[in-house]
Image (tube, rainbow, N blue to C red):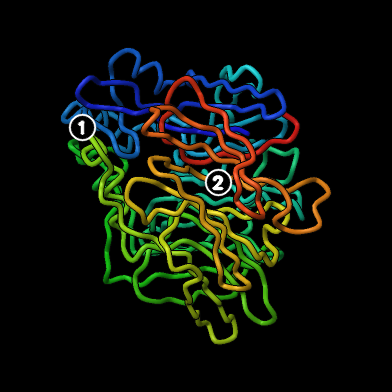
Amino acid sequence: WTHLSPPQSSRKDASISHCCLAVRHLAKDACSNRFLRTDAYAEAMDGRLTGQFGTDTRGWRRLLEIIPSLGVPDPTDNANVHVAHIDGEYVALTEAPRRVAFDPETLETRGRFRFHDDLPEHITAAHFVDDPHRDELVGFATQFGRRPQYHLYRLPAGCRTREVIASIDANGPAYIHDCSVTANHVIIVESPLVLSVFQALNPFAEGAIDMLDWQPERDTRVLVVNRNTGDVVADPTFEPAFTFHHVNAYVDGGTIVLDLVAFPNGDIVDTMSLSELDGNGFPDVPDAHLMRYRINPDSNTVNRTRLYDGAMEMPRVARSVVGRRHRYVYGQVTDRTGANGLVKVDCKTGTAKEWWKRSVYIEEPVPVQHPDADTEDEGVVLATALNTQRERTELMIFDAATLEVQARAVLPHAEPFGFHGRFFQNV
């Protein structure tokens, strides 16, 4: 069970702002963590803060670094968003096109991971969709320029050459964090949260976060692409909304069903800046809701319904139902004061189970099915949690059917809040 997180950071003492990698060996009851030895790590240890998603304190020095190259500076290798297993390597990922390979046992940094292709990418997917039915990863990259494009691609198992499925002209382009697949489609959602290269060149921009510009006069567009031909089979639009994370997608008769977590606007991004995170407590984060988009390719329309009354984020489904009809969605439920809970939503009955404990902040849940499971929810759910009363991180294992706690391990320290992780059976 491998998990990535950015450490707590502060402008006041210029503390480190780079990736922390943690691995948990469930069978061995062991946990270890280590910073990736990247350029971002070396610069931070040297007291030089560089621009990350929500942090940049260089001011006019940053402009002087940009001018000689007449372009956007080199992308960060602060790979703190997600992890993947690619062609025998375990790889830490971020949305900049620099990936870092690491040893899953020792967590030692192996060095930069490179694909064997020349796919143009300025912003890239840290969220690969791991499709077990086709034995491939699916991702996307955004290319800037006079004709910005989204490049959707597949990466077959045991391969480092990405195969382009389609290149689609972008409107904006928009900031896209995640995607979904069905058996025969790739789906991305283009929101009005636009990436502005010109804003990125502002010497006082607070990292990559200031590239983002919410333009509510634009519609949200759902792009549905045939995985086999690359044809756009639907691109319906509707009023402005924003999504970080998809849940899953599948085909239901003549319609395509996409479940995701949606925000009414792009305000969530502002709460991720260092100026908001500095100090005590938590910023006022807007609520996001579990939504179902039912897309009709024949009429090029989309019907939207809400699946769960509460607010949630970090949604996951069991790996076996990726790209297929799912019943259960697990997520971090976020609409109580003093805690983050765990929720299991039954998309068939419209009911939900929740687990809460005061002062315990659950992070992203990772459902793991039993190898011989007969049902979708036979197995466990793994999650890290911050216990603010103990000031310790807890590693928690829940029964996937009931959400009852099966095991808990308390670490001797508090880990930083994390982003995403995966369960690797053979590590």
Can you tell which quarter of the image residue 397 is in? top right
Nearer-N-terminus badge (2/1): 1
Mark 2: secondary structure: loop
The residue depicted at 39 percent of the width and 70 percent of the height is 220
From mark 2 to mark 1, how far is it between C-alphas? 40 Å
Residue type at the position of mark 2: Pro
Q: Is residue 334 left or right of residue 367?
A: left
Residue picked out by circle 2: 365
Return the x and y of residue 243 as percentages of the image width and height: 42, 59
Return the x and y of residue 121 as percentages of the image width and height: 48, 45
| Residue nearest the viewer, comparing 273 with 162 | 273
| Residue nearest the viewer, comparing 22 with 112 | 22
Above or below, 8 relative to 226: above
Outermost residue toward the bottom?
299
Above or below, 25 relative to 330: above
Q: Is residue 184 left or right of residue 215?
A: right
Can you tell which quarter of the image residue 259 is in? bottom right
Return the x and y of residue 304 as percentages of the image width and height: 47, 77
The N terminus - image quarter: top right
Residue picked out by circle 1: 63
Can you tell which quarter of the image residue 161 is in? top right
